[in-house]
Image: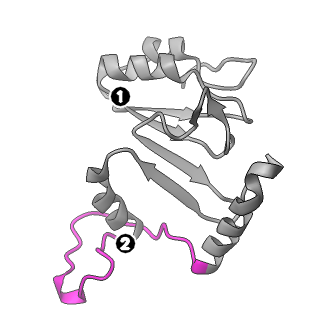
Amino acid sequence: MLDIDPATGNLDPESIENNLSKKTKCILVVHYAGYTAKMDAILEIAKKYKLFVIEDCAHALGAKIGNKSVGSFGDFAIFSFQAIKHITTIDGSMLILKNKKYAQRAKKIRWFGLVKGKPRDQNRIKELGFKYNMTNISAVMGLEQLKTFPSQN
């Protein structure tokens, strides 16, 4: 567990460096309650220790640091659209990848370890997968809310 900045509820970068271990592979940053995390300091630590950065942007959808939107700083960004979020699809989420090389694996994991569209006899499950896709109806709900989101934020 790491410390947070009591003024923002966000991760304290100093706490990251003080709590790293050989097992640390990434830094999960939550931009909380519309407040953005100190990404410059966090990215500097990640670079120094060769760590991935995952941004959880569910509580700061639309927030920016300078001219850059949250979710565009790390290697990965996740957004939840659960019932009490800024935009809701009743349930569901979105993953943003900075590097396309992770896209195929993400697609396999989200669909039971299978490659969607590949014939059944050619699909070989080699790793655990889940059902992490939203329905078309949920996606339409989210897209419609997105059209008016900037003016409501």
Q: Position of residue 90 (x, y in %)?
A: 71, 67
Q: Quadrant of the N terminus?
A: top right
Which quadrant would residue 145 be assigned to in this image? Answer: bottom right
Determine whether the residue tagged by mark 2 lies in a helix, strand or loop: loop
Residue at position x 66%, y 58% from top? 81
Which quadrant would residue 111 be assigned to in this image? Answer: bottom left
Q: Amino acid at mark 1?
A: Thr
- Magenta stretch: dominant SS? loop
Tell me where the magenta segment starts and ends, as one range. 112-136
Asked if the stretch drawn in magenta spans residue 26, the answer is no
- The extreme right residue here reads 152
In the image, is residue 62 above or below residue 107?
A: above
In the image, is residue 38 above or below residue 75?
A: above
Q: Amino acid at mark 2?
A: Phe
Q: Nearer the viewer, residue 153 or 44?
A: 153
Tell me if I can see residue 131 in this picture. Answer: yes
Residue labelled with disc 2: 112
Residue 24: which disc? Answer: 1
Mark 1, residues whose alpha carbon is within 10 Å: few (<14), some, or many (≥20)? few
In the image, is residue 132 above or below residue 98?
A: below
Q: Position of residue 6 (x, y in %)?
A: 73, 18
Q: Position of residue 18 (x, y in %)?
A: 45, 11
